[in-house]
Each structure stands twice: as C-alpha cells, then as structure tokens.
Image (cartoon, helix red, strand yellow):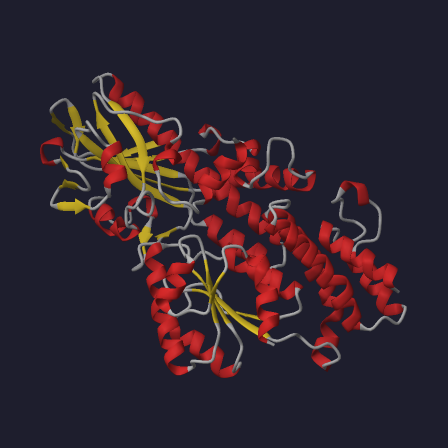
Amino acid sequence: MNEIFEKIATCIERGKVNETSPYPPDMKGQPGAVELTKQALDNGAKPQQILTHGFMIGMRRIGDKFGNGQAFIPDLMIAAKAMTASSELLKPYFSSGEIQHKGSFIIGTVAGDLHDIGKNIVKMILEGAGWKVIDLGTDVTTEKYLQAIAQNPKAPVGMSALLTTTMLNMEKSVKEIKSKHPDVRIIIGGAPVTDDYRKKIGADAYFQSPHGLPAYLENLL
Amino acid sequence: MQERTLSSQIFLSGIETGQVREFRIPLQELNFNEASVERGMGYENGSLPDFYREKITEIITRSAEVADIRAGYRILPPEQFLLEKEQVSCCRQTFQTGKIIARQLKNSRTVALFASTAGAVFDKWSKELFNEGDFPGGYVVDCVGSEIVESAADWLEQRLIEQLASQNLKITNRFSPGYCGWDVFEQHKLFSLLPPEFLGIRLTESALMVPVKSVSGFIGVGENVKRLSYPCAICDMKNCFRRRQEKRHQ
C-alpha cells in the first residue's frame, strides 16, 4: 500500500491531476492523483492514510521547495489543483467523520483590501497539511472575523493585507479580537507586514512565506 | 487606439497643461507577450512548464477580446508646482512623497498625473477560476492582468515622451503611492485632481483602486530630468515583489 501512497504524493507534488492531464510531460498518459486515490480506496486503503501519507506528503514537499526557492507559485497552484481534485473522492469520509481534520483555521484578507492570491496560497498549503480552512474571502470586517470565531471557538485566525493602508485595519481587527478572545491565536502576513508590526499590534505570529505555518499550527495542538 | 480629450488645452511656459487625455489601447499595441508574463511569474526565459505556456497563450488571446485597457494623464500647471525636499505641492494639494521620490523628481517643472487599468474583467475572471478549482488558470489571469496594466503605463510613458519631445521636455520614471515611502493613502489626493471615476477607476476608503489591475502616480516633466533604467535601486522597500523578480533575473 505504501507504494500507491508514494505515487499519490508524487502526483500531487508534481501537479499530475489525472490521466488525461498533459502536465507534467514526463508523466503523460500515466494515472494521476485522482485515479490513484480511487485505486487506493478500491484496494481498501483507509481514507485517513491516503490523506496523511499521500496528499499531505505531496503538499509538504512542494511547500518546502517553495520555501527554499526551488519552486514558484505556479508549481504550488498546480499541486493544489491535483490535491483538490483528488480530495473530492475523500469528501464523504470527511462528512462521516472517518477522516478528521487537524483543526479549523479561519482566514481572510482584511477590511478594505481585495487582494486574495496570497491568502489563497496559504489556504492551499493548510488544506494540504490536513486543516479545515474557513475562508472568509476578501474585505473581511472585524465583525465577520468575530462571527467566525464564535462558530469555531479556538480556531486560529489568519489575516492578510497587501497595502499599508489596509495594514491599519489589520491592527483594528487584531486588537478587537484579542480584547474579546485573548486566547485566539492570530497569524498575520502580506507584502507590507513585518514581525515588528506584528509585535506592535499584538498578533501572535508573522510569516513572510507560508511554508512554516503548518508546523507552527501543529505545535498549538 | 482611441483618444479622448476631456478639458480645454492651456499652454503655460511651453507645456500643455490642465488637459486630461484618455486613451483606449488595443492589446496588440502593448509591448507585452508570453515571455513578459513568464518573467512576472518568476521563471527564467524558457523554464516555464509547457502547461503554463499554453495557458498564458490562451489567456492572452482571450484578453485581446475582453480587456478594457485604458490609460490617461493630466499635466499639472507648472506655475503652481513646488518641489521640496520630501514633498510636492500643486493645485492646492501637498503630496508627502518622501525623500526618495522627491529626489528623483529633481529638475521637474511639473508632474503628469497618470493612471492605467486593464479593466474590471480580470478581477472577476481570476476569482471565478479560483472558485472553480482552476488555481493555475486563476493565477495566470492575475499575472496577465498585472503585465497588461504595467505595459499600458509603459505605453503611456512612450506617448508622453513623443508628445513632449517637440518642446525639448523629457520625463522621469513613474512613481506610485505605496512605493519608495509614499503613503498609498495619498491616492485620494491624486485622484482628486483627476475627473471622477477617471478611466473607470474608483478608490475604496482604504485607497485601493478598483479595478485592482490599475496603477497610478506621478511622472516628472522637465528639460533636465533623469530617467533610470533600474528604478528599483532607489527604493527602500525590501520585500517588494518587483525587486524580488528583478533580483531573480539578474
């Protein structure tokens, strides 16, 4: 069974979605992540094992390469596409509770900001690491974060901003959330954000690149 | 290319000012191709996977039909223009551009306020593809939109160079709020000197331009201004994506 998990991990790492997908060229005509996931399920593999030993390994590998500058955003995107397409087959097992997420993570781009590529990358990496990501979208008000926290108590919150002006809204949201929920962890990121800024506004962590985030979150469990 | 002049022309000290010019630019007129998108995505020439190359070609082809590429400028009146160490004043507005930009505007007799946009279609298109699970497609649309809007600003600079050459005037590089220490919030001041919804661009309260694929800023105008071939060298923004791209391609 380990062999098929390794094949799934490789397909996800390299972005081989299914048999008909022409990318990557050296895997043309071969089964992709979708077919291999189906095959593993048909062969009796536990869905949790497919997630842990296939999907998560593949996404971790591409995330590490991205962090080391050996892969770029497009590589992450195609890997995430392979993972998302295969995840469809595991959806029923998430619903039945047979597969457990590591936890929930709330994410959104702060009020006044409509940029979402960075947020989407973080979302993909966390889903690939086994987290349930509650995506609030862009232009997220403090109220919206607070509502999501009320529905998902203890879930860490991720905030992204791409402008220096919307960074100020990040400060407002962090302070209000912390005043009501001091135990909720808040992680911030985005082009103008720095660790000094994190300290100033009272957030718990800052990541310049998302690949270190899954390990940080696992330490919170 | 379609051109529209929005206000009467005023000649002051040899410079046409007060006039707002708007252009609608066909994609084919931009100095923009698959290779520039590839570089924008972080790849060296030729190293992008074929899958993405095909996707870029497909999206550029479609962009030629759906993009609403516009650019325009207004040259401010030189007699009201005042350049100081860290700020620029004109038309009852003072722009705190910071030292870096003020230094680059040295010898300018005035500035041209400019903006360009790739149109609203890119925001919607990219979001739709992401929502459908086509992350690579959504990302390529975003990158193509970014390259188009920057190329439209390059096109506009070229237009300005040609227009001003007969008066022996040159231009500086373009400088935008949000870069080199110029607070992005000053977009509000900049757009207050342009017609409402200039080029179809509106500003949010946080000074974000909508459509997102839009750029705006100042271009210095004068007989003895300088133009740098590598403007990133003057900026102190360490984490800027443009700087990271330039470094990667050096």
Q: Position of residue A115 (x, y in %)?
A: 45, 56
> Residue A213 sits in which quadrant?
bottom right
| In the image: residue A75, left or right of residue A24 | left
> Residue B167 sits in which quadrant?
top left
Q: Position of residue B26 (x, y in %)?
A: 44, 33
Name the residue: 32% across, 57% down: A165
Task: Say if B2 sits above or below B186 in the image.
Answer: above
> Residue B87 sits in which quadrant?
top left
- Quadrant (top left, top right, bottom left, bottom right) of the N terminus of chain A: bottom right
The number of callouts visible is 0
Residue closer to the observer: A65 or A114: A65
User: Hey, which residue is sitting farthest left in the picture?
Assistant: B79
Task: Say if B27 sits above or below B118 in the image.
Answer: above
Residue closer to the observer: A54 or B222: A54
Q: Position of residue A199 (x, y in %)?
A: 39, 65
Residue closer to the observer: A42 or A9: A9
Name the residue: 40% across, 35% down: B152
| In the image: residue B230, left or right of residue B45 | left
- Residue A132 visible at all: no
Name the residue: 61% across, 65% down: A215
Q: Position of residue B104 (x, y in %)?
A: 26, 32
